[in-house]
Amino acid sequence: MTEIRSYLSFNGNCLEAMRFYQQALGGELALQTIGESPLSEKMPAEMKACILHASLVKDGWVLMGSDMVGEQGLVRGNAVSLCLNCSSETEIRNSYERLALGGKATHPIENTFWGALFGGLTDKFGNHWVLHFHQTQHQSPDKCEN
């Protein structure tokens, strides 16, 4: 089965961000630093503590991240959002509240015309999130657009 997973890039704060997401959303966090990898010998000493690869896994989703960015550096934009499809009203409200800590709540959770609760925010790391919960069981659970 083909699937798309979100991969976030950071500039030295991947560990902090992934721990924040784990606290906000739960899941199992796996981390590999540059110093723990075969790349270690080729990298400057100050980069050895940086995260080469991180993955946060819970139920059917995976969120990945890294401190490895190209020579152009990290450029943030609004072209990508992470869509979190929640399984209950409690989950969407709790996840929204926790992800918004230190960030900006851009679209409060509200009932939508398509029968769902929906909200959006930018977290304290500059990543855009949309949260979605279908209140009706007969609708498709993969509707991330507003």
Image (cartoon, rainbow, N blue to C red):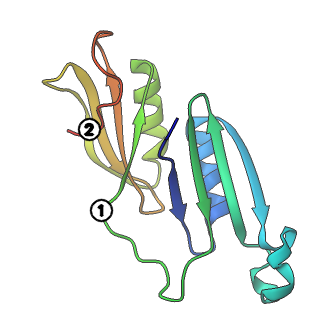
The residue most toward the left is: 113
1 sits left or right of 116 in the view: right
Q: Nearer the viewer, mark 2 or mark 1?
A: 1
Q: Amino acid at mark 2?
A: Pro
Q: Amino acid at mark 1?
A: Ala
Whichever of labels 2 and 1 marks the residue nearer the N terminus, that label is: 1
The residue depicted at 78 percent of the width and 67 percent of the height is 33
When asked about the image quadrant of residue 87, the answer is top left
Measuring from the top left, give residue 118's x and y in whole percent. 27, 32
60 sits left or right of 130 in the view: right
Q: Are marks 2 and 1 in contact (CB under 8 Å)?
A: no
Measuring from the top left, give residue 2's x and y in whole percent. 49, 40
The residue depicted at 41 percent of the width and 28 percent of the height is 92
Q: Residues within 10 Å of mark 2 (few under 14, many from 20)?
A: some
Residue identifier under label 1: 79
Q: How many marks?
A: 2
When asked about the image quadrant of residue 25, the answer is top right
Measuring from the top left, give residue 76's x and y in whole percent. 39, 71
Measuring from the top left, give residue 24's x and y in whole percent. 56, 40
- SS at circle 2: strand
In the picture, the quarter occupied by the C terminus is: top left
Q: Residues within 10 Å of mark 1 (few under 14, many from 20)?
A: few
Residue identifier under label 2: 108
The residue most toward the top is: 137
- SS at circle 1: loop
The residue most toward the front is: 1
Residue at mark 2 to residue at mark 1: CA–CA distance = 20 Å
When asked about the image quadrant of residue 17, the answer is bottom right
The residue depicted at 78 percent of the width and 89 percent of the height is 44
Question: What mark, if any, has residue 89 been given in the picture?
Answer: none
Residue 142 higher or lower than 50, as above or below = above
